[in-house]
Image: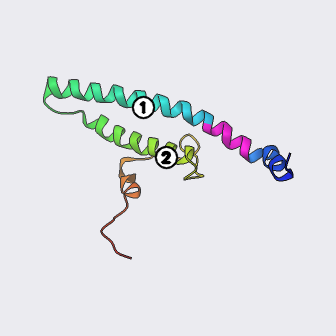
Amino acid sequence: MNEEIKQRIQKRENWQRGLFMFFFMFIYGFSNSLVIGILFFQFATLILTGKTNEFLLGFSQSLSIYIHQIINFLTFNSEQRPFPFSTWPNASDTRDMIKDSSKND
């Protein structure tokens, strides 16, 4: 076996990241189920009351940011571990996700 590959296999950081990825895969699956539950609840609320639940609007927006953070971590686009290893995103963090494409640098 190539010595470089053997050293990478023995690196603790790689295995640690793999464990975190495994953990966040389960969180990602649960979060997607939660989104489906929220959409059905919001639709039922809209039908019954004529308006959506404001609390759930804010929560679902922060949940979507959280899911985005998980995807970035799982696809190696970020080394920052999402909640519970960092703070829960709030709805105002949305502007950090969206890049202004109208600016010409």
Residue that appears at 52% across and 32% down? 27
Residue that appears at 49% across and 46% down? 69
Q: Which residue is mark 2?
A: 69
Residue that appears at 18% across and 29% down? 46
Q: How is the image coloured?
A: rainbow
Disc 1 marks a residue whose amino acid type is Asn
Q: Residue 59 in magenta?
A: no
Q: Residue furthest left?
A: 50
Residue that appears at 41% across and 27% down? 33
Q: Do residues under tags 1 and 2 come within 8 Å of each other at their CB atoms?
A: no
- Considering depth in this image, is 88 or 14 the residue closer to the camera? 14
Which badge, 1 or 2, is on the more N-terminal residue? 1
Q: Which residue is mark 1?
A: 32
Q: Residue 15 in magenta?
A: yes
User: CA separation, marks 1 and 2?
Assistant: 13 Å
Determine whether the residue tagged by mark 2 lies in a helix, strand or loop.
helix
Image quarter (top left, top right, bottom left or bottom right) of the N terminus: top right
Determine whether the residue tagged by mark 1 lies in a helix, strand or loop.
helix
Location of residue 40 by image quarter: top left
Q: Position of residue 36 (x, y in %)?
A: 35, 28
Magenta residues (range): 14-21
